[in-house]
Amino acid sequence: MKRALPILLLLLLTACATPPGGRTQLAPPTPLKGLAAVYSEFDMRLQLVTAADAPPCQEEDCTFDGAFDQRILTLGNRLAEAAYRKHPELRERFPRFEFVVADKREPGAASSSGGTVVVHRGTRRIGPEDTALAFILAREMGHVIGGHHDENVTTSILVSIAAQILLPMLNVARGAVAAVSSNVATSAAATAATSSAVASVASMAGSRALRASFRPQQVKEAEVVGLGLMVAAGWKAWDVAAQLEELRPRLAEELNWTLELRESVQRIAGQFQGPVPADGTLVANAPQMVPLLLPESRGTSVPF
């Protein structure tokens, strides 16, 4: 019965979802969504704990920090209104988005499946204008809307359960070796400890590898969903691309987060090039991502 329990859990966790990006992905079944939300929140907080703290602000800098906090709230609330209009099913998952500025030195952002979006204090120091800052928030919201946190959590749990299923087989092999040992009791204890350690390491390594393999596609999906939120909130896609292009030279390549943002900027700039349509309609060089931004607006005049 004990050995059957991990297999039962594995079957329970093999639910799938199709988020706005259209890619079928793993998702926790309804009975386990609460656990997934807690795990996601813990994962986000772990990222924050391991990030370097920002130094305390001094005099005028404190005023700038306060203004930055207010910008985050204002832009976030505007995007949240658009998110609930465009994706009304979000209210079934969480009642509202929460926007927080964390006192962390390096630029960055994080989020959880429960709708919390965190921006690092260091993001202010790369000098994003409101449009670029809104995109940073919207892209992170895109991860939430796209179910990427649920996918990551479900993957981690599945890998952990799979390791526990394989553990008994490892114990059998170790037990055979222990049987020919002169000290069976000591060998058996060592075998159990070794098996547990190997399973834990394998689980962690496997989880990280799988989640890393998902990440590039998740980022692309998040930027499309995020840009769609901005358009729904009243921004024009060409203006967003222009503001992001101005930000790109200030994005360091040695940090994973800024490198991902540079890649997002490059993709968006590549899609929204050329003159802005004077009449607001989509033209021959309209971006390929437009159908993903506003699927309900095909064949209509859209203010880009």
Image (tube, helix red, strand yellow):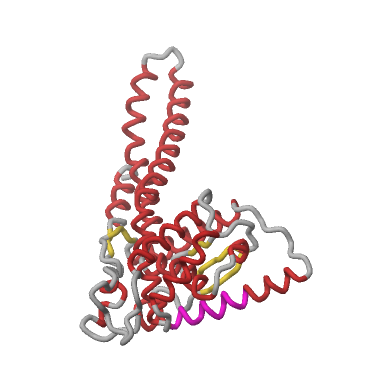
Residue drawn at point x = 49 percent, y = 61 percent: 248
Residue extending farthest to the front is: 275
**Secondary structure mainly formed by the magenta segment:** helix
Q: Where is residue 7 shown, x and y percent of the image?
A: 29, 48
Name the side, left or right, on which 116 lies relative to 286: right
Say above or below: 106 vs 33. above
| Span of residues in magenta | 69-81
Q: Is residue 22 visible?
A: yes
Residue extending farthest to the top is: 182
Q: Nearer the viewer, residue 122 or 283?
A: 283
Residue drawn at point x = 47 percent, y = 54 percent: 259
Q: Where is residue 249 shown, x and y percent of the image?
A: 52, 59
Q: Is residue 115 visible?
A: no
Say above or below: 21 vs 165. below
Q: Nearer the viewer, residue 233 or 125?
A: 125
Residue drawn at point x = 58 percent, y = 57 percent: 48
